[in-house]
Structures are given as C-alpha cells and as structure tokens.
C-alpha cells in the first residue's frame, strides 16, 4: 500500500479537533491523537465540542490532557442540547466560525489539520458538524473520523493511520479513564473499539488502524 505523507514533522503543528459530543473525538481518532503526541514535538490543539453537560465537559477536558500529554490544548464548547444540533444550525456554525476567526486575528494558530466526524454518520449531531467543517476550513486538510454505533453506519474509508498494539491499548484504557460516565453503556466496550481497529488494520496491511475520509486533498512531493 502506498503511503500518503502528511508532512507534519518539520515544525510546530496546530490541530483542531471537532466533536458533537464529549468522547466523539477520542473514540473516533484517539489513537491518532496519541500517535501525533508521540511524533510531533511542537503540537498544539483545540478541541471544539458542540454539546455537553458540566460533568461531560469536565471529562472532555481530562481526556484532552490524557490523549495529548505535554501538549498545549484548549477545549471549547457551546453547550448546545445533545441530539438537537440541526435545530441549532446557526449556533453550531458560529461555534466553528469563531474558532476559525480566532486564527485569522492572531489569538489562535492556523490549523495544519482539522479532524471532524464522518459526513455519512447516522447521528444527526455528528453529521451536522461533519457537513459544516469543510465550509469553515475551506483551505485546510479536513479528515473525517468514524464512530462505531448501533446504527450500523460504518462506511468505506480510504485513508488509514496505523496503530501499534500499545497505542490501541492505551487508547482503550484512556477512554475508560477519561469517561467513567460512559463505561456502563454496552457500546462503550473494549471489543468494539479493538474490533474496528483490527478490521481497519487488516484493510491497510497493519495490525491495527484508525480510518478516515476526506473530500479534498492535495498530493505533493
């Protein structure tokens, strides 16, 4: 399989990670976050989360620290109603636009990479964030991560980030540590997370992987 070089290792890197809910980002691409933290010395990040109670957002802030240790990370939320984001289209759009504007006026860095949910996600909150992301960050690389759920909406990705077994195990352990409120749910399960990672790893001839899609990218060498 031919590798696609992201080119994120020659200097400081700024990441913007978007989630409709606390835990979306870490479930969808927690292994990628761990890998970036290990391999990019000057990594900074902004987590932008549309919904969440005070308890859940406290978990999200803890998760950001755990998944990106020793990195400068901020967590922002509009605290919009869970499950109702399409009814709050303007507020959701403004949350993302405000993040982008901050980079334009110099109070934040221009992102080198934007992570967002999949545009084919069955959950309406995830899907709205996914649809809005490329309209806000038009000249950036936006990678869409996948979130396993009972809807059975897993699609066909075409970009993979290989994970070691240690990175996968760390991802699963940190998910449980960061989000104790979610542990009782039947979908918040080690076998679910490991099973999807093994499937995606098989597809890219690795042991484990996380998978992404993107609407547009430039191949350079």
Image (cartoon, grey):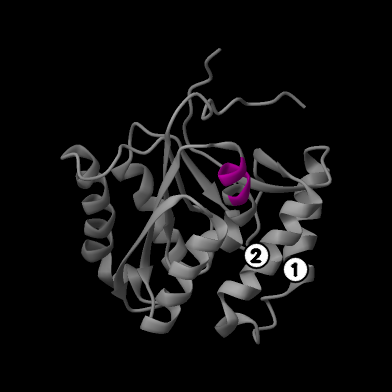
Residue located 77% across and 62% down the image = 194
Q: Nearer the viewer, mark 1 or mark 2?
A: 1
Residue closest to the eye, 79 or 87: 79
Residue highlighted by disc 1: 192
Examine the rendered structure and indicate whether residue 41 appears above or below residue 193.
above
Q: Quadrant of the N terminus?
A: top right
- The stretch of residues the image draws in magenta is 34-38
The answer to whether residue 160 is left or right of residue 1 is left
Residue closest to the eye, 28 or 213: 28
Residue located 61% across and 43% down the image = 38
Circle nearer the N terminus (1, 2): 2
Can the viewer see residue 22?
A: no
Can the viewer see residue 197?
A: yes
Q: Secondary structure at mark 2?
A: loop
Marks 1 and 2 close (CB-CB < 8 Å): yes
Examine the rendered structure and indicate whether residue 10 appears above or below residue 122.
above
Residue located 80% across and 61% down the image = 195
Residue highlighted by disc 2: 148
Q: Quadrant of the C terminus?
A: top right
Task: Provide the major secondary structure of the magenta segment.
Answer: helix
- Quadrant hosting residue 139: top left
The answer to whether residue 182 is left or right of residue 162 is left
Examine the rendered structure and indicate whether residue 49 appears above or below residue 68.
below
């Amino acid at each position: 399989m031919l590798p696609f070089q992201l080119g994120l290792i020659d200097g400081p890197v700024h990441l913007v990670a978007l989630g409709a809910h606390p835990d979306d980002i870490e479930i969808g691409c927690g292994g990628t976050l761990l890998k970036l933290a290990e391999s990019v010395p000057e990594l900074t990040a902004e987590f932008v989360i549309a919904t969440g109670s005070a308890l859940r957002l406290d978990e999200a802030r803890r998760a950001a620290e755990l998944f990106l240790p020793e990195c400068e990370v901020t967590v922002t939320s509009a605290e919009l109603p869970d499950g109702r984001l399409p009814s709050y289209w303007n507020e959701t759009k403004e949350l993302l636009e405000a993040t982008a504007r901050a980079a334009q006026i110099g109070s934040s860095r221009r992102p080198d990479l934007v992570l967002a949910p999949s545009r084919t996600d069955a959950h309406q909150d995830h899907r709205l964030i996914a649809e809005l992301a490329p309209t806000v960050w038009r000249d950036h690389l936006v990678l869409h991560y996948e979130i396993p759920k009972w809807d059975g909406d897993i699609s066909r990705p075409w970009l993979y980030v290989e994970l070691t077994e240690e990175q996968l195990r760390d991802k699963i352990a940190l998910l449980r540590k960061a989000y104790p409120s979610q542990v009782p749910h039947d979908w918040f399960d080690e076998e679910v997370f490991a099973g999807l990672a093994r499937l995606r790893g098989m597809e890219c001839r690795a042991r484990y992987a996380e998978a992404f899609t993107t609407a547009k990218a430039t191949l350079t060498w």
